[in-house]
Image (tube, rainbow, N blue to C red):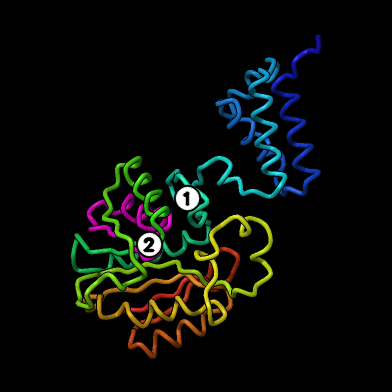
């Protein structure tokens, strides 16, 4: 009878397979996959490394590794992604939260703190799994938090995350601001819209292949949705309110110009940790 593989040997095998597939962090991802297959955290995997893996654990690890080697995002395989201080559930129906979006959260928190009210009305457009609005609500519980998305499936994920985290957020399905009567009332509007050019070859590579195209790409070389939000958001903002947008690394000048044309003040762009222009904001 063949001796069952130990957890340590299974971990080594997973790492070797991921490395051969060109995964950038094979050791880390091997531990994550084995943890998902066994239900053990890193400390438990170390402590029980010499224990034999059950056939079920080995089969589960093999299936997960095959998916990752085929390029499927870790977030989809695990069904989770860390963002800000939160552990968010994710699905193929929505954009995977990314570290660069934390810059928008940081700037939105600073904007919230400049407002005269302690209970500002905050709306996140195209919320996906609730990435931005849940981070804001977790840091500033007194905000009146709302979010929308055109995707029903994405809103279901956002609703699940809000419930699991105990962070009340009003959610509705709609295409940007179309569902709102154009009257002032909001203090902060945030948005991480699709901003990739539909012809960008990156859409056929890596994680982007598995994410909804509608959450990634926009017409007019990726600027169409950014322009639409800029052109329609201002009537919904109170005087002194802010619109904050995430955009592509080379779209800062176009976004600033459009904000200026739309009548915004105090326009400025911030760079992400990689040094790219990533978040632009303007005041009503």
Hey, which residue is sitting farthest top in the picture? 1
Q: Report the residue at 48% width, 55% height from top.
A: 94
Q: Which mark is residue 83?
A: 1
Lateral position of residue 73 relative to residue 81, left or right: right
Q: Report the residue at 55% width, 70% height from top.
A: 217
- Tell me where residue 14 sits by quadrant: top right
Q: Which mark is residue 149?
A: 2
Horizontal and vertical percent for residue 207? 63, 55
Local crowd size for mark 1, using a 10 Å CA cut-off: few (<14), some (14–19), many (≥20):
some
Which tag, 2 or 1, sits closer to the chain's start? Answer: 1
Q: Is residue 134 magenta?
A: yes
Quadrant holding the C terminus: bottom left
- Answer above or below: position of 279 versus 254: above
Foreground residue among 185 and 110: 185
Horizontal and vertical percent for residue 156? 37, 49
Horizontal and vertical percent for residue 149? 38, 62
Q: Report the residue at 64% width, 21% height from top.
A: 56
- Answer above or below: position of 147 versus 68: below
Q: Is residue 127 magenta?
A: yes
Quadrant holding the N terminus: top right
Local crowd size for mark 2, using a 10 Å CA cut-off: few (<14), some (14–19), many (≥20):
many
- Confirm or deny contact between disc 2 and disc 1 (CB under 8 A): no
Residue range corresponding to the magenta coloring: 124-147
- Tell me where residue 256 sits by quadrant: bottom left
Lateral position of residue 27 relative to residue 82, left or right: right
Lateral position of residue 226 relative to residue 14, left or right: left
Lateral position of residue 222 relative to residue 185, left or right: right
Report how far apart the C-alphas of labels 2 and 1 lie in the structure: 19 Å
How many labels, in total? 2
Secondary structure, mark 2, is strand
């Amino acid at each position: 009878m063949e001796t069952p593989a130990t957890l340590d040997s299974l971990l080594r095998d997973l790492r070797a397979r991921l490395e051969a597939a060109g995964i950038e962090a094979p050791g880390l991802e091997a531990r994550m996959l084995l943890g998902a297959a066994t239900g053990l955290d890193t400390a438990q995997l170390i402590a029980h490394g010499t224990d034999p893996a059950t056939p079920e654990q080995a089969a589960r690890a093999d299936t997960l590794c095959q998916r990752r080697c085929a390029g499927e995002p870790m977030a989809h395989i695990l069904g989770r992604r860390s963002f800000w201080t939160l552990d968010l559930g994710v699905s193929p129906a929505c954009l995977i939260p990314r570290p660069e979006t934390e810059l928008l959260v940081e700037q939105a928190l600073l904007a919230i703190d400049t407002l005269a009210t302690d209970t500002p009305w905050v709306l996140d457009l195209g919320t996906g799994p609730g990435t931005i609005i849940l981070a804001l609500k977790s840091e500033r519980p007194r905000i009146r938090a709302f979010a929308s998305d055109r995707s029903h499936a994405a809103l279901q994920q956002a609703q699940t995350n809000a419930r699991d985290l105990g962070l009340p957020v009003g959610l509705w399905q709609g295409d940007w601001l179309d569902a709102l009567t154009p009257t002032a009332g909001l203090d902060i509007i945030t948005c991480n819209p699709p901003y990739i050019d539909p012809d960008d070859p990156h859409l056929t590579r890596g994680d982007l292949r598995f994410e909804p195209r509608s959450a990634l790409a926009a017409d007019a070389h990726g600027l169409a949705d950014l322009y639409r939000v800029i052109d329609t958001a201002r009537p919904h903002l109170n005087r002194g309110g802010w619109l904050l947008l995430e955009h592509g690394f080379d779209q800062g000048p176009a976004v600033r110009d459009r904000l200026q044309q739309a009548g915004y003040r105090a326009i400025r762009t911030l760079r992400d940790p990689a040094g790219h222009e990533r978040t632009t904001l303007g005041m009503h």
